[in-house]
Image (cartoon, rainbow, N blue to C red):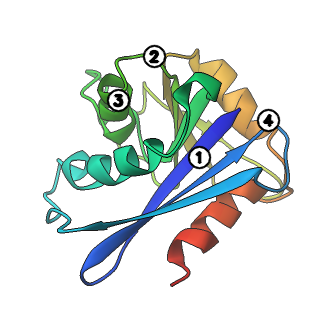
């Protein structure tokens, strides 16, 4: 089973949503929603410090023994020197037991060797895939073959919508 996670920030809290699914599912098998108060301020270059506690709170609602990989909205590495981004910090926080796939809508010019661009559907704008604990090409193929005809797979679009819904 796979878990995809995303966080949306409100004025006084953060809403984290996770969707559990199987590889080519169109609909989630289960949706998890958690709320975090007292979220840290955003610090440029240290985004993970704000987002990681929210992700971990949602992950606590899942039996990790049933999870094959976690997909995050973001990068695993922030540069070509393998400095960790959100996905890499999550991997370490989970004792390197669960592979992490980062799916980002924007590239960093500093991490072009640690990501693979992926065009889906008829979009001419790529997604940027990164991974840790799983071969990068396998991660790219997984995202490539997720359900949906658009740039962003159906379940990741659903996740984004659920996260932003009050």
The kind of secondary structure element at disc 3 is helix
Could you tell me which secondary element the residue under label 4 belongs to? loop
Please tell me whether mark 1 sits on a helix, a strand or a loop. strand
Q: Residue shown at 49%/16% (left/top)?
A: 133
Q: Position of residue 48 (x, y in %)?
A: 26, 46
Disc 1 from disc 3: Cα separation: 15 Å
Dot 1 surroundings within 10 Å: few (below 14), some, or many (20 or more)? many
Name the residue: 57% across, 21% down: 136
Tell me the CA gap for discs 4 and 1: 11 Å
Residue ID at (68%, 63%): 157
Among the 4 quarters of the image, the one containing residue 12: bottom left
Please tell me how crowded label 3 is: few (under 14), some (14-19), or many (20+) other residues with Cα within 10 Å: many
Q: Which quarter of the rendering shows the N terminus?
A: top right
Residue 29 on image: x %, y %: 77, 50
Disc 3: which residue: 88
- The residues tagged by marks 3 and 4 sit, at their Cα atoms, a distance apart of 22 Å
In this rendering, position of residue 28 left or right of residue 148:
left
Checking the image for residue 97, the label placed there is: 2
**How far is the residue under mark 2 from the one under mark 4?**
19 Å
Q: Is residue 10 left or right of residue 7?
A: left
Q: Residues within 10 Å of mark 4 (few under 14, many from 20)?
A: few
Residue bearing mark 1: 4
> Is residue 152 visible from the viewing direction of this image?
no
Q: CA distance from mark 1 to mark 2?
A: 16 Å
**Mark 3 or mark 2: which is in front?**
2
Circle 4 sits on which residue?
23
Which is more N-terminal, label 4 or label 2? 4
Single out the mark in the foreground, 2 or 4.
2
The answer to which of 100 and 103 lies nearer the viewer is: 100
- Give the percent coordinates (x, y) of residue 151: 72, 56
Sequence order check, earlier mark of 3 and 4: 4
Return the residue nearer the eye: 98 or 153.
Answer: 98
């Amino acid at each position: 089973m796979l878990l995809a996670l995303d966080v949306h920030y409100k004025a006084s809290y953060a809403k984290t949503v996770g969707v559990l699914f199987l590889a080519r599912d169109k609909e989630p098998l289960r949706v998890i929603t958690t709320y975090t108060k007292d979220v840290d301020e955003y610090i440029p270059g240290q985004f993970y410090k704000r987002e990681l506690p929210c992700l971990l709170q949602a992950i606590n609602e899942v039996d990790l023994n049933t999870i094959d990989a976690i997909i995050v909205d973001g990068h695993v590495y922030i540069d070509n020197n393998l400095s960790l981004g959100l996905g890499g910090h999550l991997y370490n926080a989970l004792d390197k037991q669960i592979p992490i796939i980062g799916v980002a809508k924007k590239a960093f010019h500093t991490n072009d060797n640690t990501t693979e661009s992926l065009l889906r559907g008829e979009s001419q704008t790529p997604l940027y895939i990164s991974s840790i604990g799983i071969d990068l090409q396998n991660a790219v193929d997984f995202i490539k073959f997720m359900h949906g005809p658009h740039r962003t797979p159906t379940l990741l679009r659903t996740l984004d919508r659920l996260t932003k819904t009050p």
